[in-house]
Image (tube, rainbow, N blue to C red):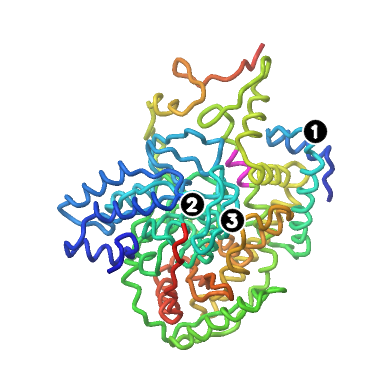
Amino acid sequence: MSIDPQEARRVAGLARIRVEEDELPALAAKFNAILGFIDELKEVDVEGVEPMTGVTPQRLTRRADVVTDGGRPREVLANAPDAREGFFAVPKVVE
Amino acid sequence: MTALNELTIAEARDRLAAGETTSVELTEACLGAIEGAGALNAVVRATPEIALEQARAADAAPERGALTGIPLGVKDLFCTKGVESRAGSRILEGFRPEYESTVTSKLWASGAVMLGKLSMDEFAMGSSNETSVDGPVVNPWGEGLTPGGSSGGSAAAVAAGLCPGATGTDTGGSIRQPAAFTGITGLKPTYGRCSRWGIVAYASSLDQAGPMARDVRDCAILLGAMAGHDPLDSTSADVPVPDFEAALTGDIRGKTIGVPREYRVDGMPEEIDRLWADGRAMLKEAGATVRDVSLPHTKYALPAYYVIAPAEASSNLARYDGVRFGRRAELAPGDGVTEMYEKTRAEGFGPEVRRRVMVGTYVLSAGFYDAYYNRARKVRTLIKRDFDQVFADGVDAILTPTTPSAAFPLGAFEHADPVQMYLNDIFTVTVNLAGLPGISVPAGRDARGLPLGLQLIGRPFEEGDLLNVAGALERQAGFVARPDRWW
């Protein structure tokens, strides 16, 4: 599997990271070095092996479905780059 | 008499208990050492006001906790209430959490004193502390040398006597590799032993917090204060926290130590091979039985890691969108929300983080998910099974080198492809994939006099036993060298 600049652009878009056009070839080359390395996994016989979902044998616990926290708009918004009237503010989404 | 900032945690504790010194004196000694160590760039934010207030409270406390009055450094990955927590990243510029991580809360509840925040690779992605927005940390063992990463600031600070202990985190070797490079001791506990709540996430199925200190005893003391079940982290283990320090009996007679043959990698430097052989001899001398074992899937651990960790990172780091916290890029007129995301993340993340997020995005994307991500998770199952088998065969701990070399020069990998740097974690990354506890103990020096570490890997949730074996290794190795002060 090899990544060309076109594919690198697609991946950058999916990751929501802007990459300038002239940086795409170098980025694709680095991707290919990493993918060449992880391609070694193809040598392993994984027939019938379950993919790991949790490394320790514990079961996820449940708690009562009740509200345990909340009502803290000041703390929630304290680090926002732009907050107004109790809301996070973003550029216009809908015309 | 040892300078106050050079005391171990156990020594400081004993002097405090005997009334021979005060927490304020200890804290001032550490703050003074920090002030004189700007050249190391290990501390990104000293917090002298908080430190002295906590120290005065410790001195006035009617009852002593496990760490009452002991000054510590905190890796900048831990959220600390009201104190900027940037994780080495530009995108978290100015982020002052409204909450405190569980691990640091527990430390303060045990009476410890916060000296400040310590440098690290950006979002804990790196093995040299060069990806930090704060610039590289320098190893006290030599100008121009890396302290390792990602907990490079913690390692350098402890090695240089800026603090007797520090918190670190370890996703693929980030506690153990820098500990080995700086001649200190670092423990990655079993996955689930310490709560991850309030620690900036890198790869959640691998991340684990742990102690970094000058010796095994201090790691045992710190772990006791950091560990414990936390309902706020669903993967935190609901198991009792034993007295780890009490486990240090020094007696390892009858223990079986496994030496995995697959760790004898091509091109391993002769001095690493010799150190490893010395380690076997030391443990035999201490009364343990040493035997060869096999971990057949070792070779696939790094490639599996570089699928799983970036995949989880791409998901975890999606939260840095310029909306809820941290930095937002300047927008041009007409820019919409997508441009805001893309510009914010392009300028907020450094090159290594951008690369890992994109690799993670790729291996999770439609058409590649099975070929890469699912396959890596299956290989992870096999890697864990290898360890399970060895432990089921009666092995108590596994001995390996911590790193394939001593500390390398800063900039050494600047023009190499990223995979070259990844190879640093070749001996440590298996432990994270299998969720096991691992500890690096300083055990020798290379031809240039730089420290080298040996790693011991233990059974899950048996850190006490692991620390005891590490203590025996430490005693046999007798590593007492400290860096000459040049900074």
Q: Is residue B168 magenta?
A: no
Residues at marks 2 and 1, CA–CA distance in whole angstroms? 38 Å
Q: Main secondary structure of the magenta part?
A: helix
- Secondary structure at numbered mark 1: helix
Which numbered dot is residue B39? 2
**Front residue of this view, candidates B242 and B423:** B423
- Which residue in the structure is indicated by mark 3? B128
The magenta segment = B312-317
Q: Residues within 10 Å of mark 1 (few under 14, many from 20)?
A: few
From the image, state whether disc 2 or disc 3 is nearer to you.
Answer: 2
Secondary structure category for the residue under label 3: loop
Residue at the (59%, 56%) spot, across then down:
B127
What residue is at 82 percent from the left and 45 percent from the top?
A3
Label 3: how many residues lie within 10 Å, few (<14), some (14-19) or many (20+)?
many
The answer to whether dots 2 and 1 both sit on one chain is no
**Foreground residue among B13 and A11:** B13
Type of the residue with mark 3: Ser
User: What is the secondary structure assignment of the residue under circle 2?
Assistant: helix
Of B235 and B430, the residue lying toward us = B430
Q: Is residue B316 magenta?
A: yes
Q: Amino acid at mark 2?
A: Ala
